[in-house]
Image (cartoon, rainbow, N blue to C red):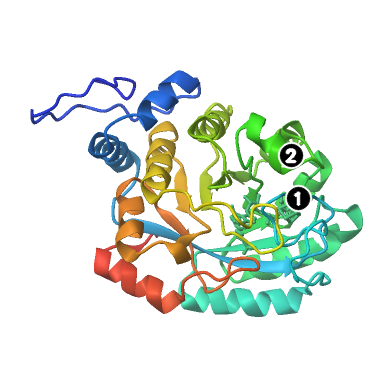
């Protein structure tokens, strides 16, 4: 049996040899068939594939800092930082390098491995490149891995960031190409793919995933994962965000996605991109310890660590350390 086989043997103990080969030719039908598997079969397959590439008890810890909040000209329907929505999030200037380094030092002392910095920009402006480079040099000097998400990038900007010490660039596809157009009108799916190509071209690692629970259908979740899993190189890091509903945004009143469907999405991402770190990202505040444990069982092996995401709360570090301890899991080395 390989990872495509959707045949299920019921009432019989089977130990299929599941292939964890990295493929880039997944079809929507194959992906939809994985979503349709009985839950225990799906989680078993995800866990089996996971163990062929990763230690099952290791979790990668990334701490997030909003280095430039609010005032973003884009109209992403889920986002608290868009000027198009009345969310009460103020627009701030870009933090200076010393202030960012102070936060990075705290993150490192708390046990973070990677420091992720987000700016509420449509795109990086050339005039800000020296300031961003200064930030990167300071954070890198602390011995942390670096990640940034600054909106769209040109090839030259991507090269400059790489040169300044940027390890990862986060730029999400967010949803299927079809659903994307219903949540964002100010830039296209193609624009996002161009930025991802610029990041790859500069030799950086890619962090790219999406958001679920925005009112999309299961086929849209299939479409998102198809877009990610058919990239010529899989993103090294795949954040799966569960929508954090923010008052004042068009997505504010969305019904919460069923947790089992969220776990299925993680399991399918794990099977499709077996060698990538799958991050259980935004939305952990609404998951119980047991539900988060289920996400790890389904192949998630990375989290945002620290009590804030960009503008919304995340679990306290102590709570996460307690949870990892209770699960017998450790920070990845
Ligand atoms: N402005 C940059 C951009 O969009 O490329 C970077 C920051 S942006 C906030 C990074 C990602 O965070 C988005 O692409 C989206 O996937 C996720 N995100 C933003 N708001 C969210 C929310 N309310 N719930 C879940 N995920 C969210
Ligand atoms: C990602 O995929 N999720 C993070 C990070 N990349 C930048 C952002 C989550 C934001 C959640 C809502 C907020 O705090 O504003
Ligand atoms: Fe701007 Fe990023 Fe928010 Fe979209 S998700 S409005 S680009 S900060």
Considering depth in this image, is 302 or 83 the residue closer to the camera? 83
Residue at left 34%, top 21%? Answer: 4
- Residue 26 visible in the picture: no
The residue at the far right in this view is 127
Q: Nearer the viewer, residue 205 or 213?
A: 213
User: Within 8 Å: ligand 1 and the Cβ of disc 1?
Assistant: yes
Image coords of residue 324 (percent x, y): 32, 67
Give the residue displayed 21% in from the left and 24% down from the top: 8
Q: Which residue is mark 2?
A: 195
| Real-space Cα separation, disc 1 to disc 2, in angstroms | 8 Å
Question: In screen coordinates, is 291 left or right of 227?
Answer: left
* Crowding near the residue tagged with mark 2, few <14, some 14–19, many ≥20 C-alpha atoms within 10 Å: many
Instruction: Evaluate whether residue 169 shows in this view.
Output: yes
Question: Looking at the picture, how far across and down is residue 91, in whole percent?
Answer: 82, 69
- Give residue 270's mark: none
Q: Quadrant of ligand 2?
A: bottom right
Question: Which sits earlier in the primary sequence, circle 1 or circle 2?
Answer: 1
Mark 1 in CB contact with mark 2 (< 8 angstroms)? yes
At a point 29% along the width and 61% down the height, the residue shown is: 290
- Count all numbered tags in the image, as a single digit: 2
Vertical order, 282 against 100 (above or below): above
Judge the density around disc 1: few (<14), some (14-19), many (≥20) Cα neighbours within 10 Å: many
User: Which residue in the protein does label 1 denote?
Assistant: 151
236 or 181, which is in the foreground?
181
Element class at badge 1 = loop
Residue 198 horizontal/vertical position (percent): 74, 38
Residue 120 position by quadrant: bottom right
Residue farthest to the left, as pictured: 12
Q: Quadrant of the N terminus?
A: top left
Q: Nearer the viewer, residue 312 or 281?
A: 312
Q: In the figure, 327 relative to 26: above or below?
A: below
Question: Could you say where residue 136 lies in the image, as x and y percent from the top left?
Answer: 71, 63
């Amino acid at each position: 049996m390989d990872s495509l086989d959707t045949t299920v043997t019921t009432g019989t103990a089977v130990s299929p040899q599941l292939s964890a080969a990295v493929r880039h030719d997944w079809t929507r039908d194959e992906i939809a068939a994985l979503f349709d598997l009985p839950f225990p079969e799906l989680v078993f397959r995800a866990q089996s594939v996971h163990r062929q590439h990763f230690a099952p008890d290791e979790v990668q810890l990334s701490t997030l800092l909003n280095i430039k909040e609010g005032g973003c000209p884009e109209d992403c329907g889920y986002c608290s930082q868009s000027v198009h929505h009345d969310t009460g999030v103020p627009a701030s200037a870009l933090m200076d390098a010393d202030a960012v380094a102070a936060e990075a030092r705290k993150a490192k002392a708390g046990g973070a491995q990677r420091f992720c910095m987000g700016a509420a920009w449509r795109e990086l402006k050339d005039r800000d490149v020296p300031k961003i480079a200064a930030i990167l040099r300071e954070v890198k000097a602390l011995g942390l891995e670096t990640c940034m998400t600054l909106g769209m990038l040109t090839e030259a900007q991507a090269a400059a960031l790489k040169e300044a010490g940027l390890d990862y660039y986060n730029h999400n596809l967010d949803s299927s190409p079809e659903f994307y157009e219903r949540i964002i009108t100010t830039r296209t799916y193609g624009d996002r793919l161009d930025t991802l190509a610029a990041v790859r071209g500069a030799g950086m690692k890619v962090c790219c995933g999406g958001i679920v629970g925005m009112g999309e259908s299961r086929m849209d979740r299939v479409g998102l994962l198809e877009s990610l899993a058919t990239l010529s190189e899989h993103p090294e890091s795949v954040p799966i965000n569960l929508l954090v509903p923010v008052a004042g945004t068009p997505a504010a009143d969305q019904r919460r996605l069923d947790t089992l469907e969220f776990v299925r999405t993680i399991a399918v991402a794990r099977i499709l991109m077996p060698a990538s770190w799958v991050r259980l990202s935004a939305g952990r505040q609404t998951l119980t310890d047991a539900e988060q444990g289920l996400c790890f069982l389904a192949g998630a092996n990375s989290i945002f660590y620290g009590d804030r995401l960009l503008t919304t709360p995340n679990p306290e570090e102590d709570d996460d350390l307690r949870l990892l301890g209770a699960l017998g899991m450790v920070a990845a080395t």
